[in-house]
Amino acid sequence: MNEQIINQPIGRRHIHRLIWRWHFYAGLFCLPFVLWLAITGMIYLFKPQLEPWLEHHYAHVTHASAQPPSAQVAAALRMVPGSVLNAYVLPDSPESAVRVLVGHGSELIRVFVNPSTLQVLNVVHENDRFMRVIFYLHGELLLGRGGSILVELVASWTILMLLTGLYLWWPRNARLGGTLYPRLKHGRRVFWRDLHAVTGLWISTFALFLLMSGLPWTTTWGGTLRSLRHAYATHVAPQDWTTGSASERAQIALANTPPSASHAMHGAMGGMDMPGMDMGDTPSTALEDYSPLDRLVTVVAAQQLTPPVLIAPPSQRSPHWTARSDADDRPRRNELTLDANTSAILHRTTFAQKPLLDRIIGYGIAIHEGVLFPPLNQMLGLFTALGLITLCTSAVVMWWRRRPEGVLGAPPPLNAGFPIVLIGLLALLGLLLPLLGASMLLVWLIERCLLRHSKRASVFLGLA
């Protein structure tokens, strides 16, 4: 690669060196987090296999006839005083335990009930379940809003790292060795260089897709997309994805608030929308009646929605009883609006009826989680995650073997200004990824205005 750089015209060499330096900075910041995201993402990919295995104790708990669903709900509510029914999960089989989701404020609790004896088998907070912990480790590092912003920043810099890496290592000759496969007989230096370059070429497309499809979940980028969605949509359908744990808690709080309490609160506050308010202490004006569930379960089961199917009572989220598929494969999700008195289906919403943006994001999330076309989708995700781990490992080895002693080893820039084309491309990328743009500008200002004036820092960073 060094010979290729030397033989290039000075302008192209300058661009190459600048891109190489930003690639180095991106790797320096991203690599530990990329390893973390790859490992947690690999675990979450196998949620469809892991979750049933983790809950196999509840697959065969009875062979007797079941009690009415309303009695099962009552047993669950007694275990969590002050809670309300959030949703009743349609059982997978007559022998399995019933899952009842109960809520209090912005909390969601899963209660496992023996359907025939009404014995409560387990009570667990939804966010304490293993796959939910992995979900938040992957998306927020268990740090809440700050973690979501950090993961978004990492994702943005990783996109820069992959794009600059593709430019740096894109094959400029017809040689297959070192392009499609690593050369094994040219020494360790060439092997690690080839392993890094070849892996990057094979996985970059998949990795870029995973990174872009994950951005709608983030707090700032996803929050901006949500605002634009509301501002320009002809009709705003309920959003089927959350933008961080705070957004998820707000949705849970809406579903845990009975309509009567919601109306009273809106009347008191002049109709203001308070999606982020904790309504855990909001009293219901009357004891909730869950007896319609006994009739609705039979009606919903006959519709053969993709499991898991959640039947929810009226709430601030919806004034009617609803039944919805909560399948990981989002294009298979349907939702029914039900009449509690007649058990009639008032309305059916299918994935195909959602706005185009929602459908695009739904497909993207399904592919991101490996559920759109399993098991090939899972294998592609696993291949990409292992490739990212290989990229990180080979990058560290290359850096450690090549860096001069006593300095960071960043590629030194040539003494020339930034080319207009490069500035335009970086500005465009910064507009599409605002956290990346702001942080790159900050890095450039710190390097130019502070570090260049320190002899020790300048030598260490390769600026001298």
Image: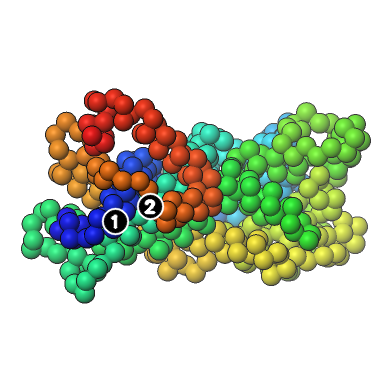
Query: What's the distance in space between the residues labelled 2 and 1, CA to CA?
Result: 9 Å
Seen from the viewer's position, the closer of residues 352 and 196 is: 196
What kind of colouring is applied to the model shown?
rainbow
- The image position of residue 427, as x and y in percent, is 49, 50
Q: What is the secondary structure assignment of the residue under circle 1? A: helix
Residue located 33% across and 42% down the image: 25
Q: Evaluate if marks 2 and 1 touch, with contact meaning CB atoms under 8 Å apart.
A: yes
Residue located 40% across and 51% down the image: 160
From the image, tell me which residue sits under label 2: 419
- The image position of residue 389, as x and y in percent, is 31, 51
Residue located 26% across and 45% down the image: 414
Which quadrant of the figure has residue 366? bottom right
Instruction: Report whether 119 appears left or right of 128.
Output: right
- The image position of residue 391, as x and y in percent, is 29, 53
**Residue 359 visible in the picture:** yes
Residue 377, placed above or below residue 124 = below
Q: Identify residue type, mark 2.
A: Pro
Instruction: Report whether 306 appears left or right of 439.
Output: right
Quarter of the picture containing the C terminus is top left
Seen from the viewer's position, the closer of residues 383 and 54 is: 383
Residue density around tag 1, few if under 14, some if 14–19, many if 20 or more, within 10 Å: few
Q: What is the secondary structure assignment of the residue under circle 2? A: loop
Q: Which mark is residue 11?
A: 1
Residue 275, placed above or below residue 313 = above
Q: Identify residue type, mark 1.
A: Gly
Quarter of the picture containing the N terminus is bottom left
Which quadrant of the figure has residue 45? bottom left
